């Protein structure tokens, strides 16, 4: 298998990832009821592509406050440690489904770190 090398590769991962999230009743309500991403999924996937492309490929273009986005979601429905574990599991599965290599491992490590930071920030209530 090849490594993640392009924005198209990242799109393939995040699209598969969201298919998994929507199929998992333990977490899907966050993306359908709490924040109805399913109504503008393609636009959301493009934001994720920009984020991960900036992180992995150095392309730039992501300007949102990632912490504030998650604090806003948490204000509507509590994001738990279990939610973050489910999120990571599905992301890792989506990556491993199609790719392997250095960028894949970087994506997993960064996702793990982001998960930990988000949980701390949510507990503190700070952006």
Image: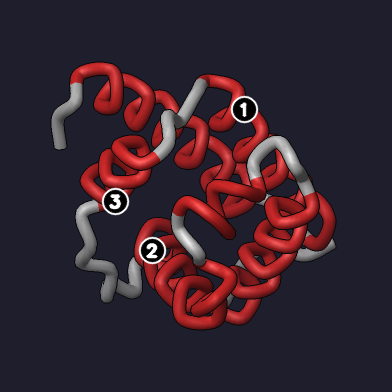
Q: Determine the residue positioned at 77% across, 65% down.
A: 2
- Against 79, is 98 above or below? below
Q: Residues within 10 Å of mark 3 (few under 14, many from 20)?
A: few
Q: Is residue 81 left or right of residue 2?
A: left
In what quadrant of the picture does the N terminus appear?
bottom right
In what quadrant of the picture does the C terminus appear?
top left
Q: CA distance from mark 3 to mark 1?
A: 18 Å
The local secondary structure at tag 3 comes to helix
Q: Residues within 10 Å of mark 1 (few under 14, many from 20)?
A: few
Q: Is residue 97 left or right of residue 39?
A: right
- Against 45, is 69 above or below? above
Q: Determine the residue positioned at 84% across, 55% down.
A: 97
Q: CA distance from mark 2 to mark 3?
A: 13 Å
Q: Which residue is mark 1?
A: 85
Residue 3 image point, x, y percent: 69, 61
Q: Determine the residue positioned at 45% across, 57% down.
A: 35
Q: Which residue is mark 2?
A: 51
- Against 76, is 79 above or below? above
Q: Is residue 89 left or right of residue 14?
A: right
């Amino acid at each position: 298998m090849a490594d993640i090398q392009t924005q198209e590769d990242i799109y393939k991962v995040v699209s598969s990832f969201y298919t998994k999230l929507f199929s998992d009743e333990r977490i899907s309500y966050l993306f359908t009821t709490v924040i109805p991403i399913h109504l503008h999924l393609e636009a959301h996937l493009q934001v994720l592509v920009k984020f991960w492309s900036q992180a992995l490929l150095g392309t730039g273009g992501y300007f949102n406050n990632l912490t504030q986005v998650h604090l806003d979601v948490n204000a509507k429905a509590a994001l738990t440690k279990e939610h973050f574990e489910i999120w990571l599991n599905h992301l890792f599965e989506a990556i491993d489904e199609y790719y392997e290599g250095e960028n894949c491992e970087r994506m997993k490590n960064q996702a793990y770190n982001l998960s930990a930071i988000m949980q701390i920030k949510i507990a503190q209530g700070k952006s």
